[in-house]
Image (spheres, grey):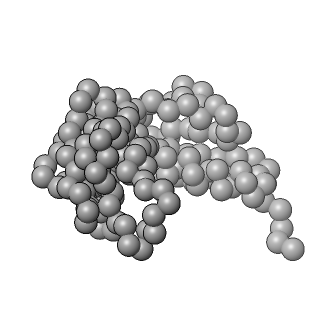
Amino acid sequence: MPPKTTHFERTTPILEGTTVTIDKKLVTVQGSKGEIVRDFSHVDVEIKKTRNNIVVSVDYPRSRQIALVGTIVSHIKNMMLGVTHGVTYKMKVVFAHFPPTVKVEGDRLLVENFYGEKAPRRAKILPGVTVTVQGDDVILEGIDIELVGQTAANIQHSTKLRRKDPRKFHDGIYVFEKQLGERHWKL
């Protein structure tokens, strides 16, 4: 059995071009693209700002608290990358049966003629996310990775087909590329 740890901490450097303020467990990150505020008061950890670093620590941790320290550090890194570089998700409209029409109306994305249906399907666009339609591509942009990701999930879920074999019926709108800072994924 390994010895018991009495203190555990992780540090992350503050990115150039960002300003981080911490008031108790309320973390505010400002950058060239905007500001993100996040409340971590529900987590039993300590968040401090040193000269050029953010330190997240816990005393007498259990394994769940050790995992939470790493999670909070990742959230703060994503906040800093979002306010400096932004977050971009690209989605592709895929169809084999009926060509759908995709358009943005206010805070909703409408998918008309999806699988030949008369009524349009709707997906909620969360505040802070900009959605543009370019041909068969739907591009989502914002500064908060969680809001952009949830909007992409709303769009993908709105085109879900029930009682159809997913190996044959691929119709829908799917994420094919993600970008956060210099990190770039093609799915």
Quick one: quadrant of the N terminus?
bottom right
Residue 79 image-quadrant placement: top left
Q: Residue at left 25%, top 43%?
A: 112
Would residue 73 be found to the left or right of residue 8 on screen?
left
Which x, y percent locates residue 110? 28, 38
Would residue 146 be found to the left or right of residue 177 on screen?
right
Q: Residue at left 50%, top 60%?
A: 163
Which x, y percent locates residue 117? 31, 46
Which x, y percent locates residue 9? 63, 52
Which x, y percent locates residue 152? 37, 48
Residue in the foreground of this view, choosing between 148 and 76: 148
Q: Residue at left 67%, top 34%?
A: 42
Residue 28 image-quadrant placement: top left
Q: Is residue 85 at all visible to an observer of this figure?
A: no
Q: Residue at left 23%, top 57%?
A: 98
Q: Is residue 29 at all visible to an observer of this figure?
A: yes
